[in-house]
Image (cartoon, rainbow, N blue to C red):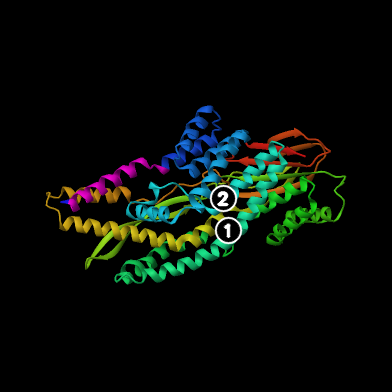
Amino acid sequence: MKFKFWLIFISLGALLFSACSNGVKNNTTFENALINKYCNKEIYTTNLQKLEKNNDVIYTGLNVGLIARNCGDFNKSNVFFDRAEEAYKYDVDLQNVGKKGAKVVATTLINDTIVDYEGSLYERIMVNVYKGLNYMSLSDYANARVEFNRALMRQDKAKEYFAKEIEKNREELKKAKEDPNYQQNMNENAKIIDKEYEHLFEAFDTTKNFINPYASYLASVFFFMDNDFRKAGGLFREVAAINSKNAEITKQAKLFKDASRKSSKNKKKYIFVVYENGFGVVKDDFTLTLPFLVEGKIISASVALQTLKKREGSFEFIKVNGAKTSQFVDLDNIVATEFKINMPAMISKALAQTILKTTLNLVVANNDSTGGWLTLASSVATAATNKADVRSWRGLPKNISVAMVENKGEISLKNPQGAELFNTILDKKKNALVIVRSFSPVLPVNVQVIEK
């Protein structure tokens, strides 16, 4: 009787958790607020209340932080980004063994959506980049320097993390082989899943190394504008090495190199334009029906898996005082690189979830004396929780292009067809960083001008 009560409790609990977690709906809500530039106090107040209740802090902080940034509310943006970064540190990085173990049990039994979103490494880097830009817009260059240094540090840590993650995947594979049904349930099914992913990575250029040139580029421009030419030049050498065939980057590399060798009293001033294009790749899910060996029987069951979904870009480039921006980093490829490295662990976990739920369903069916109601409840709970986690930072761009022109006191931005997007007067005695964000060709661009 206790056994049956426990199963009923698990089934009802699973349904409750599944109903409470609606990642797809929240993703859409955040995206609409960003595109339509909802800058009302209600969206901040509602989501600040979520943060106070410790409700999915990273997911909420990242998305609302970017909404506030897009509205030009840089202080409010950093409030949300700060909370997300704090949660990275205390709820993810320093999470104790007991809490991690409880999460593994819960997510294996139900799915990943019942626990708070923990984010990705590329997102951690970008949160410091955007905080740095926010502080620049607020003319707080001391704090901006801290944030760009953190972004660079996180980038270095990411390289170390992935080396360890690859080794951890090998160790987990060894443990999985101890399962007597390993050959059928894990090895053979993993091969089938791998084939499903083969076509996915044909659309991306993934590497073994995790490098985000966008973070390095913006940090270089920051240090240049802050008159730290030596540090700016050193950082830009890394950007130039990765983009050695890009004429625009080569041209800018010469300026950074020359500036690092000369006095900071450079007579010419420059405009650095960064164009963030479209919407970047996001997580999606799909299910795959596979055979599992459970209690000596071959049973077909659905496995919920994550995948990546590419989204549309806006303008391929923009014109800055007549000069075209040149694409130098594809953020979709960076996301895909991290996804590919983490994929073996994700597949193993998805298979483990399915095996456990299938085993429970079979045990329930074999011990059901309720006329089939308990079996039905267990099956419904399994179907309801058979979902992959699709939460992500929805507003990151698809790719980045840049241009540098001499500052002659004015900037004009035009689309590829020559229609004017933005025009303003600049101080000829200052360098300027202009961030241009375009979500769609039919929507107005969002432009932030920083002068120093």
- Bin the neighbour count of mark 1 within 10 Å (Cα to Cα): few under 14, some 14-19, many 20 and up: many
Q: In which quarter of the image is the C terminus?
A: top right
Q: Where is residue 79 in the image (x, y as percent from the top left)?
A: 57, 37
Q: Position of residue 83 (x, y in %)?
A: 54, 41
Label 2 secondary element:
helix
Q: Which residue is drawn at 59% across and 58% down?
A: 157
Residue nearer the viewer, 285 or 429: 429
Q: Which residue does the numbered mark 2 point to in the structure image? A: 124
Q: Position of residue 158 (x, y in %)?
A: 58, 58
Q: Where 133 falls versus 108 (above or below)?
A: above
* CA separation in Å, label 1 and label 2: 10 Å
Horizontal side, residue 356 vs residue 245: left or right: left
Residue nearer the viewer, 276 or 372: 372
Label 1 secondary element:
helix
- Bin the neighbour count of mark 2 within 10 Å (Cα to Cα): few under 14, some 14-19, many 20 and up: many
Residues at marks 1 and 2 touching, judged by CB atoms closer than 8 Å: yes
Residue 129 is labelled as: none
Q: Is residue 342 visible?
A: yes
Horizontal side, residue 106 vs residue 328: left or right: left
In magenta, the rendered stretch is: 2-23
Residue nearer the viewer, 361 or 417: 361
Q: Which residue does the numbered mark 1 point to in the structure image? A: 158
Q: Which residue is drawn at 55% across and 38% down?
A: 80
